[in-house]
Image (tube, rainbow, N blue to C red):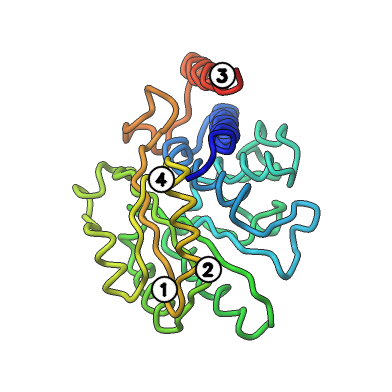
């Protein structure tokens, strides 16, 4: 159980990241706020507590790796990277602009802190599995983390990678599934049900943990447990709320890939600012 001070600090960081997400998609007039907001808490824990990373040495060969397999949710990753110090937070306002550092999907060649270019759904976990396997050949001891969407796991390549990771006993690999139950065309159950997600990963030979993806205690415990697992990769199925933190976006499929207008931007930022002020009081 985390102490109250740590929880408060994490909640403050998460609130600021959500503000960065809204700032980015508003200024871009496009983007994917819903899923970005649902993975915010997991990303905050990974970058501030879990992973061995250093923004002053982003290409450190010994660093832990992160792959955002659901690459369209880059606004959240960018906001966390900016918060961590990889680049100025002012860059968030140039999201998706021509020639800007921060494009609509992660670009490992153009953005400090991005370990893999992603966007074509289903491919990120394959890259993550390759990175995890590479530790056997490069003499390093890093861990690899990837976040997938629950709609994304409808892709066949995800299960090829899952089978490969289990066959190779990649116990330094953790796949976190953002189970917010909504994808671009509706609920995941209506489009092409992936349920039961936990049983599918278990059948493929993974160690599986189910958590509330907005509960820092549960995120912390799950990742600590993953570090104890030997001989198999770990899948953490995170039950989340799409659009988490912004009242009119929560659990609304319409916010999968829509940017707020000026009035909606103002309301979202007012809500998040009020939440931040309460946390900092």
Q: Position of residue 198 (x, y in %)?
A: 28, 61
Taking 159 as reference, is 24 above or below it? above
Label 2 vs label 4: CA separation?
Answer: 21 Å
Q: Are dots 3 and 1 in contact, CB under 8 Å?
A: no
Label 4 vs label 3: CA separation?
Answer: 22 Å
Q: Secondary structure at mark 3?
A: helix
Res 146 visible: yes
On-image quarter of the C terminus: top right
Front residue of 227 and 3: 3
Label 1 vs label 4: CA separation?
Answer: 23 Å
Residue located at (55% from left, 74% from top): 132
Identify residue for label 3: 273
Graded by Cα atoms within 10 Å as few (under 14), some (14 to 19) or many (20 or more), the crowding at tag 3 reads some
Identify residue for label 2: 128
Between circles 3 and 1, the one closer to the viewer is 3
Q: Secondary structure at mark 1?
A: helix
Q: Secondary structure at mark 4?
A: loop
């Amino acid at each position: 159980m985390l102490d109250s001070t740590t929880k408060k600090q994490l909640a403050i960081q998460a609130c600021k990241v959500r503000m960065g997400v809204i700032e980015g998609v508003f200024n871009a007039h496009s983007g994917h706020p819903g899923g970005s907001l649902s993975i915010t808490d997991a990303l905050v824990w990974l970058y501030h507590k879990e992973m061995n990373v250093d923004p002053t040495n982003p290409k450190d060969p010994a660093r832990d790796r992160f792959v955002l397999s659901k690459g369209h949710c880059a606004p959240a990753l960018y906001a966390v990277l900016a918060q961590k110090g990889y680049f100025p937070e002012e860059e968030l306002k140039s999201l998706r602009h021509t020639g800007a550092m921060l494009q609509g999907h992660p670009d490992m060649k153009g953005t400090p802190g991005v370990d893999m270019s992603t966007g074509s759904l289903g491919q990120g976990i394959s890259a993550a599995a390759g990175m995890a396997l590479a530790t056997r050949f490069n003499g390093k001891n890093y861990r690899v983390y990837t976040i997938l969407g629950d709609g994304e796991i409808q892709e066949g390549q995800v299960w090829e990678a899952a089978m490969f990771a289990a066959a190779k006993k990649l116990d330094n690999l953790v796949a976190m599934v953002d189970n917010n139950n909504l994808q671009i065309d509706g609920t995941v159950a209506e489009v092409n049900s992936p349920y039961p997600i936990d049983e599918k990963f278990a059948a493929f030979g993974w160690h599986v943990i189910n958590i509330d993806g907005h509960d820092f205690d549960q995120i912390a415990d799950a990742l600590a447990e993953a570090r104890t697992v030997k001989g198999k990769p770990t899948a953490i199925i995170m039950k989340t709320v799409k659009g988490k933190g912004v009242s009119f976006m929560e659990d609304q499929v319409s916010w999968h890939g829509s940017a707020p207008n000026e009035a909606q931007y103002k309301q979202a930022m007012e809500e998040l600012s009020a939440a931040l002020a309460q946390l900092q009081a």
